Each structure stands twice: as C-alpha cells, then as structure tokens.
Amino acid sequence: MPYGEMCVLGGSSLSSFRRKRSAQYSRFSREAVGQRGYQTVIMAVVNETLGVRQLVKKPATSRHAWMAASAAWTALIFFSSTSIASEYCERAFAWIYGSMIGKQFPSDKAFDWMHFLAEKSVHLTLFFVLGILLWQVFTATQWRRVCEVVLLGLIVGTASELVQSFFPDRDPALRDVVINVTGTFLGAAVCARKNRR
C-alpha cells in the first residue's frame, strides 16, 4: 500500500476520511479515537485512490493490559513510600557507594550529595515510567492526554508523599511532589514526541 493513512475508528462515519483521497500522503500516520463501552475497534485503511480498502475488527484488550500495568506500577510507587522499601534502598545505596564511589569520594559531603541525587533519581524514574504507562491508557487528543497523564501523576505523587507521613522514618516533602510531576510529564512528553513522528 504505497500511499495511505491508518486510522482507528469507533463506528463513526468514514466520509471525512474519503475526502482526503485527493491529498498526497508520503507516510502512514495513526490516530487513536477513544470509544468507551465497546470491546472492539474498527481499523479502516484509507487509500489515496481506492478509498476505504479494508475493515478489520480487533479486540480492544491492549488498553486493559496497560491499565493493569499502570495500577501495578502505582502500587510499587506506594510501596516505595514505606519504611520497608526505604530500608532496602538505603542498604543498596550504602553497598554501591562503599564499593564503587566511596573510594574516590570518601567525604561525608560527597556521601550526602550522592545520596540526594540517588533518592531523587528514583523518584524521577518511577514517575517517568508511570507517565509512559498512563499515556497508553488514555485515547484523547495529544495535548489532552498529556494533561490527563500529568494530572494523575500529580494525584499519585501527592498521595505517595502523604503515605510517607504514616512512617516516622520517612520525610514527605513538597519538593518531591514537584519531582514526581516532572517525571510524569517527561514520560508523557516522550510518548507524545514519538507519536508525532
């Protein structure tokens, strides 16, 4: 199929796509249109000269899988806010620093800086992955998806900091909420940029 456009439809009219037959297409593009309440989506292949060539029904199970993955990752984020997770992370950092970094930077100030960077990197990474997973769940327009992902990242990030307040050895901070939201936004931004190509 030399020239065409792949579009995912939810039972809507195909006339708007037929009007594009006169345009010249140099590559395929994909646009996801959400259709709540349906278990299948219709994939329509629109060609420059032949119009609608093929209709294929495909089970819409992938979104449910992404929702499950997002829920599991959110549970991991909440677990990382507990004292048990903090204890294991502290042990892992102490071993890594002592065996790899501490020999070159033995001072207490270097230890504190490396500990700070490692802790915030964990925050950023956890929420970066969350942003990618949540992006796969939503099916709105690109900028709306970014807003929805960031909003959920804000909710999860704030809730994870509130969870820390129930553990005396944890230290919830507004700064960490900002880092969490930033990580979520970066994950969504990477997905948005990839979809534009």
Image: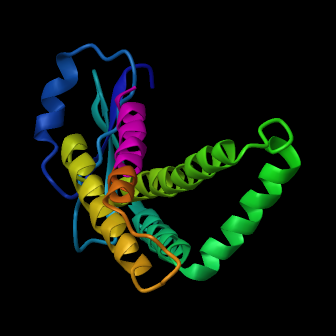
Residue 98, position in %: x, y? 83, 52
Q: Quadrant of the N terminus?
A: top left
Q: Is residue 167 visible?
A: yes
Q: Nearer the viewer, residue 196 or 109?
A: 109
Q: Is residue 156 magenta?
A: no
| Residue 48 falls in image quadrant | top left
Q: Is residue 136 above or below residue 3?
A: below
Residue 110, position in %: x, y? 67, 42
Q: Is residue 99 left or right of residue 4?
A: right
Q: Is residue 56 visible?
A: no
At x 34%, y 68%, the residue is: 156
Q: Quadrant of the C terminus?
A: top left
The color scheme shown is rainbow
Q: Is residue 109 left or right of residue 80?
A: right
Q: Nearer the viewer, residue 176 or 12?
A: 176
Q: Is residue 46 above or below residue 183?
A: above
Residue 185, position in %: x, y? 34, 46
Q: Is residue 39 above or below residue 128?
A: below
| Residue 3 falls in image quadrant | top left
Residue range (magenta):
182-197
| Residue 18 falls in image quadrant | top left
Furthest toward the bottom, the residue is 166
